[in-house]
Amino acid sequence: GVSVRRRAVAPAGELGAKRLGAYAAAPPTCRDAFLRAGGVARVSAYTDMSIAGDTTFPAPQWPDGFTVRPYAAVQDATIFLDTINRSYAGVWGHHTLTMEEALAWLPEVVAEGAFLLFAPDGAVAGICRAAMSKRLRERRGEQTGLVAAPGVVPERRSEGRYLPQPLHA
């Protein structure tokens, strides 16, 4: 345990890193004990949930004037970049994308399943993505859809905009 942590952390220190972030995908008891023993503090958690594919959900409830459009209907990389960067601003684990990074990522995004949320004034308000996941299909051995990363711009986070997005997706 200790030597594994040392081998993982030492190179970051040698490169002058002030902090080191890590994703630890292991059963919680093993992961938490391993990380705590090394003095690592948890700053965020990733939740992986599943539900039967034929489950029905209530329709999302949007305040007047809010609209959701798939990226396929928007087709504007500048709007996509602004939506991604603003929706995840300040969220641990996310960094500000450059246009170059966004353009490299867009071909992988299922345009019909990337839902952009717009406020009544037309400003971006959030995003949520949904698509069939090749990675999860391979891991689980069955077709698996993925609803991922609902994000809301900072000025709208206290308004309850998170839940309607995955319901819509």
Image: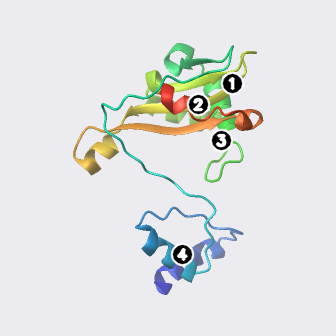
Contact between labelled residues 1 and 3, with CB atoms less than 8 Å apart: no
Q: Residues within 10 Å of mark 1 (few under 14, many from 20)?
A: many
Rendered position, 121 above or below 42: above
Counting residues from the start of the chain, the first of labels 4 and 2 encountered is: 4
Q: Residue at x 41, y 48 (%)?
A: 49
Residue 143 x, y percent position in the rendering: 26, 37
Contact between labelled residues 2 and 4, with CB atoms less than 8 Å apart: no
Three-letter amino acid code of the residue under disc 2: Ile
Counting residues from the start of the chain, the first of labels 4 and 1 encountered is: 4
Q: Residue at x 40, y 67 (%)?
A: 27
Q: CA distance from mark 3 to mark 1?
A: 12 Å
Three-letter amino acid code of the residue under disc 4: Leu
Residue 94 x, y percent position in the rendering: 62, 48
Give 149 or 101, whichever is nearer the viewer: 149
Rendered position, 65 above or below 135: above
**Residue under circle 1?**
124
**Residue under circle 4?**
35
Q: CA distance from mark 4 to mark 2?
A: 32 Å
Q: Secondary structure at mark 4?
A: helix
Contact between labelled residues 1 and 4, with CB atoms less than 8 Å apart: no
Q: Residues within 10 Å of mark 3 (few under 14, many from 20)?
A: many
Q: Secondary structure at mark 3?
A: loop
Three-letter amino acid code of the residue under disc 1: Val
Q: Secondary structure at mark 2?
A: strand
Rendered position, 73 above or below 107: above
Q: Which numbered tag is attached to residue 127?
A: 2
